[in-house]
Amino acid sequence: MSEELQPVFSVERLYVKDLSLEVPHAPQIFLEQGEPEVDMRVSTGNTKLEDGFYSVDVTVTVTAKLSEERTMFLNEVTQSGIFRLENIPEEDVQLLLGVACPNILFPYAREAISNSVTRAGFPPVLLAPINFEAIYQEQQGANA
């Protein structure tokens, strides 16, 4: 009598893998007026650590500029997690790694960005949520 194995999806560890903040024109930049142009870039990646364990990274880069040559700050964080995925079909594993895991990690990355920007003396940056499912579908289409 064979017992069907239950699927497992769990968060084993969440951590900041990399965090950097640059304020290249400090302290003069604090005296300048103007509304900065804020650019955000997001990338994800994952690697298999061992059977059933995967590392997933979400890297968020935020650049605020007053003009093309006047950068207020450049802030980058890689928020990572170790996830346990067992007894899950391979196509579902890829979906979980590409969508569910980044959805779990992104709020932590967003908080790290906001905290470090505030500590640098700037108003907090509130980043809009990301549709990782749309990004995943786009990548799947590009790979097809």
Image (cartoon, rainbow, N blue to C red):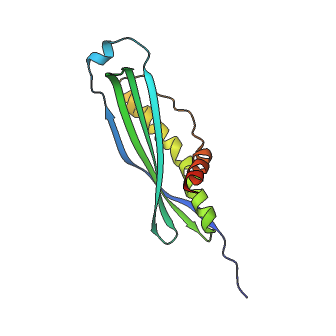
List x then y, in percent, for residue 69.
31, 22
List x then y, in percent, for residue 132.
58, 46
Q: Residue at x 52, y 32 (%)?
A: 127
Q: In the rendered image, which quarter contains the N terminus?
A: bottom right
On the question of residue 102 being in view, the answer is yes
Q: Residue at x 26, y 19 (%)?
A: 27
Residue 130 higher or lower than 38, as above or below: below
Q: Quadrant of residue 121?
A: top left
Q: In the rendered image, which quarter contains the C terminus?
A: bottom right
Q: Residue at x 49, y 43 (%)?
A: 108
- Looking at the image, which residue sits at the far bottom? 1
Q: Residue at x 33, y 24 (%)?
A: 71
In the image: residue 132, left or right of residue 3:
left
| Nearer the observer, 47 or 87 | 47
On the question of residue 56 being in view, the answer is no
List x then y, in percent, for residue 63.
40, 30
Q: Quadrant of residue 88?
A: bottom right
Residue 52 higher or lower than 142, as above or below: below
List x then y, in percent, for residue 104.
55, 49
